[in-house]
Amino acid sequence: MQRHSSTADSNSTHLPLVRRLLSLPEPLLVGFLLLLWLLATGWARTLSLPDEGRYVGVAWEMVRSGDWLTPTLNGLPYFHKPPLFYWLTAVSLSLFGTIEWAARLASCLGAMLSAGAAYLLIRRWMSHSISRWYLLILATTPLFYGGAQYANHDMLVAGFISMAIALTADAVLSLQATQPWRMQLIGGWICAALGLLSKGLIGIVLPGGVIFFWLLFENRWRVIPKLFWWPGPLLFFVTAAPWFLLMQQKFPDFFHYFFVYQHFQRFSQSAFNNAQPFWFYLAVIALTSLPWSPWLLARWGLTRRNELQDTSVVQLRSLFWFWIAVITLFFSIPTSKLVGYVIPVMPPLVALITEGLVQGTKLGWRSKFALVVVAAGLCLGALVAISRAENVSSKALAQAYQKNAAPTEPLVFLQTFRFDFSFYARLLQPSIVIDKWDEPIVKDSWPKELADAARFRPTVGEKVLVKMSDMSKILCANPVTWAVSPEGYFSNSKELQSLEPVAISGGYVLLRITPLLPSLGCSKN
């Protein structure tokens, strides 16, 4: 009886919490459940290389250095992307520690914004029932789910792009319905500014392009001047401009490198990595939206009479189509393509899929929910497959270094640079990278990223980017030096091949090196 009473008391203590959750307004409740779903597996795999390790490593350097203005990669200014992802991730790491789910929290927040954008539009201008199914379907769409589990800039900028479009569209529809619209418009401008701080010019170009072509198609081009109501552009400038101006003042070549090279040249030239055909994103969208993408065809089965019942609903549908078309076309033009670029099309795509599933078919709720369960299983199965396939993480080497190295014993990289090592080993200083720095670097690669970054701080670059001819000098400078090297280089190195690795993982070795190693010739240095 006593045990039964204890169990009952335990259950009763949880009931008020459950009741409070269920009593929340629907948007807050579904948002909370969505966040739980996305965070539940954020810890399940190590950081992927190169992207997750690189970007989380930059955020970790902000934490360790205390310099939150200038993103750095191994102590060198890193201007491939703006700082907002790094700021959010650095805050998360400061609060929760160097653990994987904390490193991915910014992407989860971006996913919440992305999901909320179309949800609020559908809920206000279409149907509450469609908005609920929309969230279930979006949450179990592999591309959306995978983007929320991946620590890079793509999902964060997708969230702000989606919110900028949704808020601006809501302002247009509210203006048309003679309802308050200015606050939504201001929110759209602020989200565009945060999108610019997330990944650059696409934060403003893509929302602007979607809204512009949508309004032209709807013959509402006269509304466009009202969208430039002066508080919006002013708040955009106040939000986005200070960091860019500070970086240009501090590094005179910043504007050219960030805007001309990283934006316009990457968009227009074919010399960058990941070259793909023009139709690449059509295939990506169709495959990474399974099992839901076939239901987009059901959207065409809806009768013309139903489509014309409400002007706002018809306009919202056309917005969704332009949202998909403009963003897909924009990213299809460059030769260089990555899957994550097209994540911003997920909210409108799933909105149309949901309408087709709910209104264009005769499936009952049990059949629909069964599809949700199957889709969720596909998301989790893909996560497990990716986790097993990824075996190049530096986590094991970093843990071996932490376990065996004294705080005064430095770490160097030999013909490699492991982006995630700093995060997992909690390194407090940049590491020397020994490589063929006297040879030209043409291809996109980790040496080019470090060499480009060294241009902004040449004195630091000279210290941390060391030529192979000076390797013995570096390895002889301390009583003990730790090194990370590819197994291939280690096994063929006359200076190092006699050493016994402290740890081996994913094709890389961790070495403990002392000046007593005869092959180094330290006495001659």
Image (tube, rainbow, N blue to C red):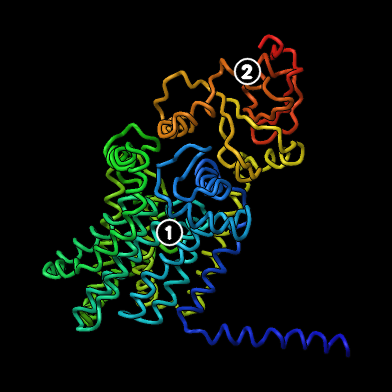
Residue 411 shown left or right of residue 109 in the figure? right
Residue 362: where, in percent of width, then height?
40, 78
Residue 89: where, in percent of width, then height?
52, 55
Inter-mark Cα distance, 1 to 2 = 54 Å
Residue at (65%, 17%) from the top-left corner? 493
Category of crowding for the residue at label 2, using alpha-carbon neighbours closer than 10 angstroms: few (below 14), some (14–19), many (at least 20): some
Residue 78 shown left or right of residue 182 in the figure? right
Residue 522: where, in percent of width, then height?
70, 14
Q: Which mark is residue 42?
A: none
Residue 23: where, in percent of width, then height?
54, 87
Identify whether 498 is placed above or below 196: above
Residue at (73%, 33%) from the top-left corner? 503
Q: Dot 1 lies on which element?
A: loop
User: What amino acid type is highlighted by mark number 2?
Assistant: Lys
Q: Closer to the observer: label 1 or label 2? A: 2
**Earlier sequence position, callout 1 versus callout 2:** 1
Q: Is residue 10 visible?
A: yes
Q: Which mark is residue 289?
A: 1
Residue denoted by label 2:
473
Category of crowding for the residue at label 1, using alpha-carbon neighbours closer than 10 angstroms: few (below 14), some (14–19), many (at least 20): many
Q: Are marks 1 and 2 in contact (CB under 8 Å)?
A: no
Q: Residue furthest top?
A: 524
Quarter of image, res 296? bottom left
Residue at (37%, 41%) from the top-left corner? 250
- Of residue 332 and residue 356, the one placed in the foreground of this image is 332
Residue 344 shown left or right of residue 61 in the figure? left
Identify whether 250 is placed above or below 225: above
User: What amino acid type is highlighted by mark number 1?
Assistant: Ser
